[in-house]
Image: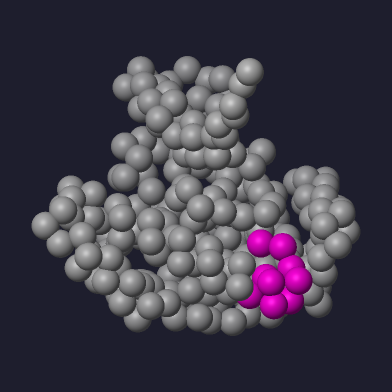
Amino acid sequence: MKEKVTAIVTWLRKQVALSHTKGLVVGVSGGLDSAVVAFLIKKAFPNQSISVIMPIKSNPVDMAHAKQVNEACGIKEMTIDLTSIHEAMFSRICKELNEDINDDNRRLADANLRARLRMSTLYTVATNYNYLVVGTDNKAEWYTGYFTKYGDGGVDLLPLIDLTKEEVRKMAEFLGVPKEVIEKEPSADLWEGQTDEIEMGTTYDMIDAYLNGHPIPIEHENIIKTMHKRTEHKRNIPTPFYFTE
């Protein structure tokens, strides 16, 4: 694990040098993945890394965990409450949609707007300091497309992309992430009571096993394959059209 941490930290420094930027910023939610990234970017750039906490009607426990993570790794932090901005924007959009609003998709649209407001906030902060935005998606989330396009998927660097959820958990233990964060149930904080595994219909253990080539129950395999196929567009750049002769 020490070698993996060293490799990621070295890579982060290289990417900053190649991009002619000065440091790194991450959004910390109080969850496992963002906690690990906060620790990693602090190691890579002790004086040029920032953690941004961005509550939107967020669970106070998650916000407390986010602050606990920042204190544990000693990273510079700022809190930008986006609740009123989200409420104003989402209500305005719904008002314009009026009778055309799709109630079945309303909660998902609300959740995705939260993720995209956080992305916009991170890039505004990053531009101010000439930093890069670091993402928190792990191998399981990337493969299944369990991220918001141009939301938490809208980043410059993905240091955890080759680590399963279990590997991220082991890295968290190695780095000294608070125990409460390591052991909590994964949630993207998209709405009250939301958890990753309930929303996906499968578990990270199942996804990790599948990605490692181990047999899993067919119903879970089908869910994972369907998620991967349905979200292929998220892992690709926008599809261009070219005139041909």
Q: How is the image coloured?
A: one colour
Q: Where in the figure is residue 242, as x and y percent of width and height?
A: 60, 29
* Span shown in magenta: 125-133
Which residue lies at the image location 53% right of the left edge and 81% below the top edge?
79
**Is 71 displayed left or right of 97 in the figure?**
right
Q: Where in the figure is residue 61, as x and y percent of width and height?
A: 40, 73
Magenta region includes residue 162:
no
Which residue lies at the image location 46% right of the left edge and 61% below the top edge?
116
Q: Quadrant of residue 72?
A: bottom right
What residue occupies the far front of the structure in this picture? Answer: 245
Is residue 105 something one can see in this rendering?
A: yes
**Is 122 displayed left or right of 229 in the figure?**
right
Choose between 57 and 82: the one closer to the eye.
82
Choose between 206 and 199: the one closer to the eye.
199
- Vertical placement of 15 versus 30: above or below? above
Choose between 92 and 134: the one closer to the eye.
92
Which residue lies at the image location 49% right of the left edge and 35% below the top edge?
233
Is residue 206 something one can see in this rendering?
A: no
Magenta region includes residue 130:
yes
Question: Which image quarter is the C terminus in?
Answer: top right
Which residue lies at the image location 54% right of the left edge and 71% below the top edge?
121
Image label count: 0
Q: Where in the figure is residue 154, as x and y percent of width and height?
A: 56, 54
